[in-house]
Amino acid sequence: MCDFTRPQEPILAAPDFAKARKVAEETLQRLKIIYPPVDPRFVAEALGINVNYVRFSFPTSEEISGYIQPDKNQIVVNEELPTNRILFTIAHELGHFLLHKRYVKSHNYNVFPRYNNYPKGKPPEEVEADIFAANLLVPFCMLKKYENVASTHELAKMFCVSEDVIVNQLYWLRATSR
């Protein structure tokens, strides 16, 4: 089991948004996934990573979405989360597997509690894993096809993510298209 505390120091100085997007796109291309919704469990299993659903005891169940066990090539997910949160968690942890091999094998890797108020800001590794997850689940190439024909609510259902993920992806899609 992992220690559920914050790491001492981040490995990255800053998140690399372009790299996170590129690795997500390359992963989808390699697996020939071209239509939503993207199933991150399928992606994980295609990459040889097992996904294990666990019921945590209280208060851990309220604090942890999931984590990776790199030595077991496994993602552990809190089974009590809503479906869209489970999918995002699997995609986020895949991001750690694909982007942060050095980090997850270091003494700094610990499981982060599920909250948005980080005293020193969200660690760069966590931001990168979030960007990877958003781009794996809602890649720009797929979102472009539907952005003008469906509402944010409809897109969230289509991609099996929260409306917040859709709003953020639409923002970045439009910002990078300029």
Image (cartoon, rainbow, N blue to C red):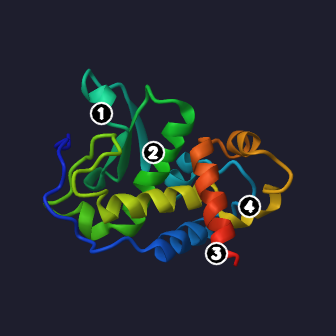
The earlier-in-sequence mark between 4 and 2 is 2
Residue 16 image offset from top left, x and y in percent = 42, 74
Amino acid identity at mark 2: Thr
**Vertical relation: 108 (above or below) 75:** below
Q: Nearer the viewer, residue 117 or 145?
A: 117
Secondary structure category for the residue under label 4: helix
Q: Quadrant of residue 108?
A: bottom left
Q: Could you classify mark 3 by the number of other residues whose Cα lies within 10 Å: few (under 14), some (14-19), or many (20 or more)?
A: few
Q: Could you classify mark 1 by the number of other residues whose Cα lies within 10 Å: few (under 14), some (14-19), or many (20 or more)?
A: some
Secondary structure category for the residue under label 1: helix
Quadrant of the snapshot with the C terminus: bottom right
The earlier-in-sequence mark between 4 and 1 is 1
Residue 142's mark? 4
Q: Is residue 48 visible?
A: no
Residue 176's mark? 3
* Mark 3 → mark 1, Cα distance in angstroms: 34 Å
The earlier-in-sequence mark between 1 and 2 is 1
- Cβ–Cβ under 8 Å for marks 3 and 1: no
Residue 134 lies left or right of residue 64; in this view the side is right
* Mark 4 → mark 3, Cα distance in angstroms: 15 Å
At 22% from the left edge and 65% from the top edge, which residue is drawn? 10
Residue to which mark 2 is pinned: 89
* Mark 4 → mark 1, Cα distance in angstroms: 32 Å
Amino acid identity at mark 4: Met
Residue to which mark 1 is pinned: 63
* Mark 1 → mark 2, Cα distance in angstroms: 13 Å
Q: Nearer the viewer, residue 127 or 90?
A: 127
Amino acid identity at mark 3: Thr
**Vertical relation: 172 (above or below) 68:** below
Residue 48 image offset from top left, x and y in percent = 46, 56
Residue 119 image offset from top left, x and y in percent = 22, 51
